[in-house]
Image (cartoon, helix red, strand yellow):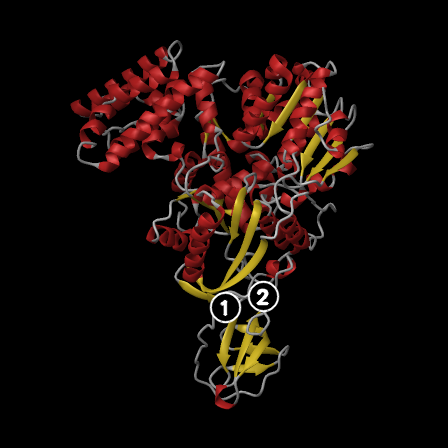
């Protein structure tokens, strides 16, 4: 294989032979290229595709890797196991799960399914949802599973813990897990947790897979959690030919369980490891890379690397301080319109990143007002739309009748007279007999208690599910979906409603798109079973959706921007308290992750990067006066509030000062520490006026700043 098109560090990574290798691949340095060419090179040197495993985090990345390997290595490349972590584990469990009593037809529960189960748990345990949020519980359970802490182990740990919240959480986790087990269902955390358990509990199985995978390659290693770390370490234990590729400067998912120590301490886990740094960037202009490096080098938890490029630019980076969030949004729309004409760009060449979803509303208003096309990434995903989830739930019950969550969803879809009271009775009977809801539909104790009409509906419903279950063994996914759509009456109902209702017409279009997606799956997949299709749908994430290319300006949170690139990027809301998010008393690790998040946003820009902040911003119904983010200054573009000679001034606002009745205070000097009865402690950063018009600007420890008229402000020196 000709490696001449690779730069020297890339060639070193590709041609490395035996032993562990750590590839520190900075943003835009061609890491996917290195992984795929390395796989092709291994195949060329005689390694069997059967002996290679490559894992990454999103379906898009996995599919891109598969396509590239196929192009580079031909038919051999198609036999390499390339997948996401969760897809690998799902396939592994379908093949080997019988060793722990797991059926091949298990269902994979998504976030919404998990919340439904948790709500049932809270109801049974008589816990108020308002005090214990189902979303919070789902997140907690996920984090425990990321740490390989199953329900039984957690209960033992909680019993000895001084934390009362942990002790109160244990019974919820235990009941939640028992409900999943009874429904023959796994959540995302279970996929990896149970795979690790199987490998650790069955020595012959562990030896089988350790012997099989001579070479393992892991993409985005900085995003791995504890469970994924143990999984990879277990599989690679025999041959130790482990190639991990990642960038500690882009580790931004600790809230999902990612542990940056996995990449930072890789050299401690494996002796004689080869470390290669990819620092030549092929995406961004040098001024953007300079600003990003100045920012991220403030982190202590990182491997030293500095990106460089042959791409120079006089456009580069600018920082801008606007009066408020509305002015910020209007200014951004103006800049986009101007740059589009000036440089001949398309709207899709622009993207706006923000720290929280709440910031999108004012931006959307500005775009709609000016009739500039945009699309919002991170809104309701296709497979989360109600009508789509209904049909998918039918498929889940057809394949796995024990799936209580899906059965409850569809038992009255479309409305068939099986109301809340009937469903509660069915659930109560199922609980008494310790059987799935589906089996309860065949109980005489149920049927004899129902009215004639409801009994007939139950009989028709269970007959439909059984018939579809038989057909699913031989017919295609699209054929089964079509039959569900028509035999349930959904088609007739929506077709009639869509004549006068645009929303119903939209639902009908979504179902047609689902049928199209099923047909596309059948064309591209070697396994065309309903189970395989459900696995593919269940493992889709919002990160896969965020990579779709659409017309219009892209609006998204910075977390969803990873892996993308745009000629022009606006990184907005760079204010203390918002980005970095939180108060001024940051833990070091939290602040460093916020800094890495800003770094990720900056390195998405190819040609031009705008850093914007607002003097005041209304969020969640309250107006906040914030200092420009420290990240702007750390990147080399400081904005000095209230002083002449600002480094990148644009529309610098004069916020209204507050008038709070008080006695005129003493003359405050810049740099002095002060205390305000409402806002707490802070530091004077500017002063102006004289006498009764004497004003000071105070940066409070909360991260906010306020301009105060000393005559009225309750300030005192510290």
Where disc 1 sits, the SS reads loop
Callout 2: 10 Å neighbours few (<14), some, many (20+)? Answer: many
Q: CA gap, disc 2 to disc 1?
A: 10 Å
Across and down, in percent, residue 514 comes to 36, 25
Q: Do the residues labelled 2 and 1 touch (CB within 8 Å)?
A: yes
Q: Can residue 429 be seen in this view?
A: no
Q: Is residue 16 left or right of residue 345?
A: right
Q: Name the residue under label 2.
A: 639
Across and down, in percent, residue 5 comes to 70, 28
The dot on residue 652 is 1
Q: Quadrant of the C terminus?
A: bottom right
In-front residue for pair 554/126: 554
Q: In this view, does 389 lie to the left or right of 7?
A: left
Across and down, in percent, residue 692 comes to 48, 89
In-front residue for pair 478/127: 478
Q: Which residue is drawn at 20% across and 24% down?
A: 492
């Amino acid at each position: 294989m000709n490696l001449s098109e690779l730069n020297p560090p890339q060639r070193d990574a590709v041609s490395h032979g035996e032993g562990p290798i750590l590839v520190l691949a900075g943003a835009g340095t061609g890491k996917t290229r290195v992984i795929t060419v390395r796989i092709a090179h291994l195949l060329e040197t005689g390694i069997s595709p059967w002996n290679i495993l490559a894992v990454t985090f999103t379906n898009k990345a996995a599919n891109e890797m598969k396509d590239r390997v196929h192009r580079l290595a031909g038919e051999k490349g198609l036999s390499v196991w390339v997948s996401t972590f969760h897809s690998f584990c799902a396939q592994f469990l379908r093949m080997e799960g019988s060793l722990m009593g797991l059926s091949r037809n298990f269902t994979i529960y998504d976030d919404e399914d998990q919340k439904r189960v948790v709500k049932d748990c809270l109801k049974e345990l008589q816990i108020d949802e308002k005090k214990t949020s189902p979303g919070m519980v789902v997140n907690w359970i996920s984090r425990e599973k990321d740490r390989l802490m199953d329900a039984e182990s957690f209960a033992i740990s909680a019993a000895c813990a001084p934390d009362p919240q942990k002790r109160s959480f244990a019974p919820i986790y235990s009941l939640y897990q028992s409900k999943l087990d009874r429904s023959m269902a796994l959540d995302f955390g279970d996929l990896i947790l149970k795979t690790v358990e199987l490998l650790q509990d069955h020595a012959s199985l562990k030896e089988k897979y350790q012997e099989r995978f001579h070479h393992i390659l892991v993409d985005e290693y900085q995003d791995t959690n504890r469970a994924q770390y143990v999984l990879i370490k277990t599989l690679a234990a025999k041959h130790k030919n482990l190639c991990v590729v990642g960038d500690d400067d882009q580790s931004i998912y600790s809230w999902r369980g990612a542990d940056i120590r996995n990449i930072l301490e890789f050299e401690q886990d494996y002796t004689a490891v080869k470390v290669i740094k990819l620092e030549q960037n092929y995406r961004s202009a040098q001024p953007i890379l300079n600003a990003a490096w100045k920012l991220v080098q403030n982190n202590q938890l990182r491997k030293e690397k500095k990106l460089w490029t042959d791409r120079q630019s006089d456009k580069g980076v600018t920082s801008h301080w606007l009066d408020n969030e509305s002015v910020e949004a209007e200014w951004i729309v103006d800049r986009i319109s101007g740059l589009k004409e000036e440089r001949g760009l398309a709207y899709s060449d622009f993207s706006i990143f923000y720290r929280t979803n709440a910031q999108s509303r004012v931006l959307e208003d500005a775009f709609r007002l000016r009739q500039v096309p945009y699309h919002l990434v991170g809104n309701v995903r296709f497979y989360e739309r109600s009508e789509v989830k209904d049909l998918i739930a039918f498929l889940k019950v057809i394949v796995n009748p024990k799936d209580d969550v899906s059965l409850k969803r569809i038992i009255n879809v479309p409305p068939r007279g099986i109301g809340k009271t009937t469903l509660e009775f069915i659930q109560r009977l199922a609980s008494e007999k310790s059987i799935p809801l589906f089996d309860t539909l065949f109980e005489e104790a149920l049927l004899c208690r129902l009215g004639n009409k409801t009994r007939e509906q139950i009989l028709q419903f269970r007959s439909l599910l059984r018939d579809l279950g038989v057909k699913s063994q031989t017919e295609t996914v699209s054929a089964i979906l079509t039959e569900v759509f028509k035999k349930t009456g959904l088609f007739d109902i929506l077709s009639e409603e869509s004549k006068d209702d645009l929303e119903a017409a939209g639902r009908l279009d979504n179902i047609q798109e689902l049928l199209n997606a099923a047909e596309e799956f059948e064309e591209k997949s070697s396994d065309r079973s309903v189970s395989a299709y459900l696995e593919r749908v269940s493992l889709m994430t919002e990160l896969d959706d965020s990579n779709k290319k659409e017309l219009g300006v892209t609006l998204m949170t910075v977390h969803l921007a990873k892996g993308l690139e745009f000629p022009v990027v606006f990184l907005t809301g760079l204010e203390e308290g918002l980005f970095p998010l939180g108060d001024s008393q940051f833990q070091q690790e939290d602040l460093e992750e916020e800094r890495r998040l800003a770094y990720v946003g900056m390195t998405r820009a190819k040609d031009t990067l705008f850093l914007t902040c607002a003097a005041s911003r209304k969020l969640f119904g309250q107006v906040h006066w914030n200092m420009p983010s420290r990240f702007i200054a750390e990147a080399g573009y400081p904005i000095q509030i209230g002083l002449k000679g600002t480094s990148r001034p644009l529309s610098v606002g004069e916020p209204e000062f507050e008038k709070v009745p008080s006695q005129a205070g003493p003359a405050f000097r810049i740099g002095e520490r002060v205390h305000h009865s409402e806002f707490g402690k802070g530091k004077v950063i500017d002063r102006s006026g004289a006498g009764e018009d004497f004003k000071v600007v105070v940066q409070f420890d909360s991260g906010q700043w306020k301009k105060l008229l000393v005559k009225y402000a309750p300030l005192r020196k510290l």
